[in-house]
């Protein structure tokens, strides 16, 4: 059970994840353990995988290998070309073989065989000096986040996260990309909402990692080295959580405002 979120921002990328790993055997959950689901690779790539832990480890290793391969440097590719390279590697080396094995094992162990071969991936990286956010579905099919579709989510928490992300976008940044600060706030609130709402398997501690411009970058030389990934510390998350609580308190207090005060209470229509 997982929730991983990615948001394309005007000045970088935000990715967030819940912190619960569910162990299982033959499709039956056994225990839940705390874990970090987002990995920073080569100081400027962030990867999160929803699905079997072992398959996720191989997917992360494959993306890192593609980045460091001098024959086809991933960072020098256009987004469409990078998506094609990653997709082919994930399917040919990892997802495809797992699907084939699962199909053979289906008759012996049932639907749990299929579950061991299904994974979704969200990753961000700088390409030609620009930050890019991608998601790859269960078949490895890619999609890039854009200015008009700037957020993605994967995992069992997606049915809760997507509507809430759309709601916050409509309120706070309906016609433009958010800033990194707004993206962090939106990611934290969505994770908090999903953790409080999900029937099970999406849990604390939340993790948020950002891809931002390095402090010593040169605007005259926009290369991939100008971008750096880092995980937010508890003190940074605390500030956003306090802001979330303040926003929720405003909603709670909204209907408590009495008429003739500074803010007049807006009546709730009676049901017909």
Image: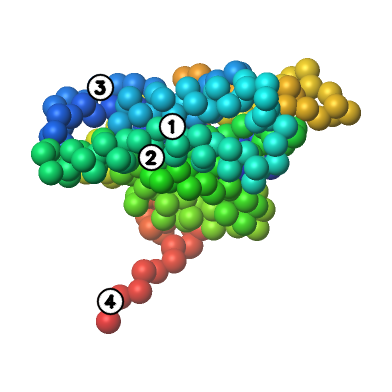
Q: Is residue 47 visible?
A: yes
Marks 1 and 4, how far apart at CA: 58 Å
For mark 4, what is the residue? 271
* In this view, 114 is above or below 148: above
Q: What percent of the width, then of the height, locates residue 9?
A: 63, 42
Q: Secondary structure at mark 1?
A: helix
Marks 1 and 3, how far apart at CA: 29 Å
Direction from residue 139 to residue 182 in the image, left or right: right
Q: What residue is drawn where x is 38% and y is 29%?
A: 56
Label 2 with label 1: CB-CB less than 8 Å: yes
Direction from residue 97 to residue 128 in the image, left or right: right
Residue 94 position by quadrant: top left
Q: What residue is drawn where x is 54% and y is 23%?
A: 64
* In this view, 183 is above or below 19: below
For mark 2, what is the residue? 96
Q: Earlier in the sequence, mark 1 or mark 3?
A: 3
């Amino acid at each position: 059970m997982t929730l991983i979120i990615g948001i394309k921002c005007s000045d970088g990328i935000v990715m967030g994840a819940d912190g619960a790993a569910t162990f299982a055997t033959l499709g039956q959950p056994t225990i839940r353990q705390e874990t970090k689901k987002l990995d920073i690779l080569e100081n400027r790539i962030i990867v999160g995988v929803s699905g079997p832990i072992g398959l996720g480890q191989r997917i992360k290793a494959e993306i890192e290998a593609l980045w460091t391969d001098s024959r086809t440097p991933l960072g020098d590719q256009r987004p469409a070309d990078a998506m094609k390279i990653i997709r082919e590697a994930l399917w040919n080396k990892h997802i495809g073989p797992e699907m084939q094995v699962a199909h053979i094992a289906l008759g012996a162990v049932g639907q749990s065989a299929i579950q061991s071969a299904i994974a979704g991936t969200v990753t961000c990286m700088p390409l030609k000096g620009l930050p890019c956010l991608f998601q790859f579905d269960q078949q490895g099919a890619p999609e890039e986040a854009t200015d008009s579709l700037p957020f993605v989510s994967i995992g069992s928490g997606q049915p809760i996260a997507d509507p809430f992300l759309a709601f916050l976008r409509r309120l706070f940044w309906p016609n433009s990309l958010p800033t990194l600060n707004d993206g962090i706030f939106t990611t934290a609130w969505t994770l908090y909402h999903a953790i409080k709402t999900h029937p099970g398997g999406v849990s604390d501690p939340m993790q948020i990692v950002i891809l931002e411009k390095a402090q010593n970058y040169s605007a005259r030389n926009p290369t991939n080295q100008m971008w750096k990934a880092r995980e937010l510390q508890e003190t940074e998350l605390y500030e956003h959580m306090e802001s979330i609580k303040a926003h929720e308190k405003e909603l709670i207090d909204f209907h408590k405002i009495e008429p003739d005060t500074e803010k007049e209470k807006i009546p709730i229509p009676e049901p017909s």
